[in-house]
Image (cartoon, grey):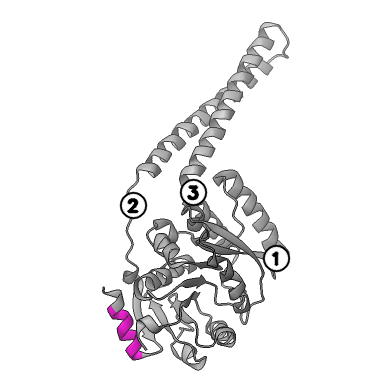
Amino acid sequence: MSAASLPSLVVVTPVYEDVEAASKLFQELFKNFGSNVYVVAVDDGSVKQPLEISSLLSANLPGVVINLRRNVGHQRAIAIGLNYAADHLPQAERIVIMDSDGEDLPATIQELIAPLESADIDVVVAQRKSRVETLRFRAFYVVYKWLFMLLAGKKISFGNFMALKPEAVKRLVAMQELWIHVAGCVLTSKLRMATCPLHRGPRYAGQSKMNFVGLALHGFKGLMVFAEDVLVRVGIACAFIAVLSILASISAIILKLNNIATPGWFSIALGILLLVFLQTGALTLMTLMLTGVVRGGSVATINYKDFVAGVEFSDAKLGSALEEEGQK
């Protein structure tokens, strides 16, 4: 089999200490697509349960396991998988990103990729009809979406489960934001996006490695993609509060001149308002300066190959062909 004769559907999935769930995912992919799917599994520096190519072979799936030198997080693991697909899999017509724990259902992939038949759509993202999560997570997610809209001015209601055309993948891998937050990168990429309501499934096995602190950090990384927008909005809010403090100070002075004030009230009120003005004014200047730094900052280049410790192929001859493709 040559690189050109590989399946046109490519699935990119990160795996971290979760071999049992990943193996079940591979079996479900074979159940739904047979050998008509090529898997790019990125082992994110697993130590206790490293993913091996045998998991793909036992499921009769063609694919590759990319072993990373260290744990880089699932967002960077996805970025590495997409970079690999862009370099080595030119035959890919549809690239699907999905988690390996079973919450992204292989049976819904056909429904997810269907809108890509339109020439006006570059990427399709999954919106959840239902979730199998705790009340604490749901409450946090609602607060996060509200803060994201408030600070970034964007609505985010999707995660990693998405389908892309090859042109969209090439655009994303050229963006440094992909290494920070995949969904945020899609939002800022200006790609033509469609949504597909899908149900979320339960985990195949084990427990989620993502704790509350990790979820909070993941949410803040999403805001980092829109750092410039966030800084401008914070600056505007600080300037607005500074103006209000000036108006309140003028009102306090007028009340004092008209003897409409209790003893000691004027000095306390004016002192507090002066402090508010100085603090918000300083914050406004700082946010304007940081916005300039963000806008004028140089674009960092990241070579995904620096993170790769080794690559295992389900077919050795095919692996050689793919390596030659990547060197072109």
What is the number of the mark on residue 226?
Answer: 3
Which of label 1 and label 3 is nearer to you? Answer: 1
- The magenta-colored residue range is 316-324
- Does residue 299 belong to the magenta stretch? no
The numbered mark, 1 or 2, whose residue comes first in the sequence reads 1
State the predominant SS element of the stretch in magenta: helix
The residue where tag 1 is placed is 129
Relative placement, left or right, of 218 versus 40 is right
Q: Secondary structure at mark 1?
A: strand
Sort mark 2 into few (<14), some (14-19) or many (20+) by Cα contacts within 10 Å: few
**Is 190 located above or below residue 44 in the figure?**
above
Residue at mark 1 to residue at mark 3: CA–CA distance? 27 Å
33 or 228, nearer to the observer:
33
Query: Do the residues under discs 1 and 2 have CB atoms within 8 angstroms?
Result: no
Residue at mark 1 to residue at mark 2: CA–CA distance? 37 Å
Quadrant of the image containing the C terminus:
bottom left
Q: Position of residue 108 (x, y in %)?
A: 62, 75
Answer with the quarter of the image where residue 271 lies.
top right
Tell me the kind of residue under disc 2.
Answer: Val
The numbered mark, 1 or 3, whose residue comes first in the sequence reads 1
Tell me the kind of residue under disc 3.
Answer: Phe
Q: Residue at x 71, y 7 (%)?
A: 259
The residue where tag 2 is placed is 299
Q: Position of residue 270 (x, y in %)?
A: 61, 19
The answer to whether residue 104 is visible is no
Q: Residue at x 44, y 78 (%)?
A: 40
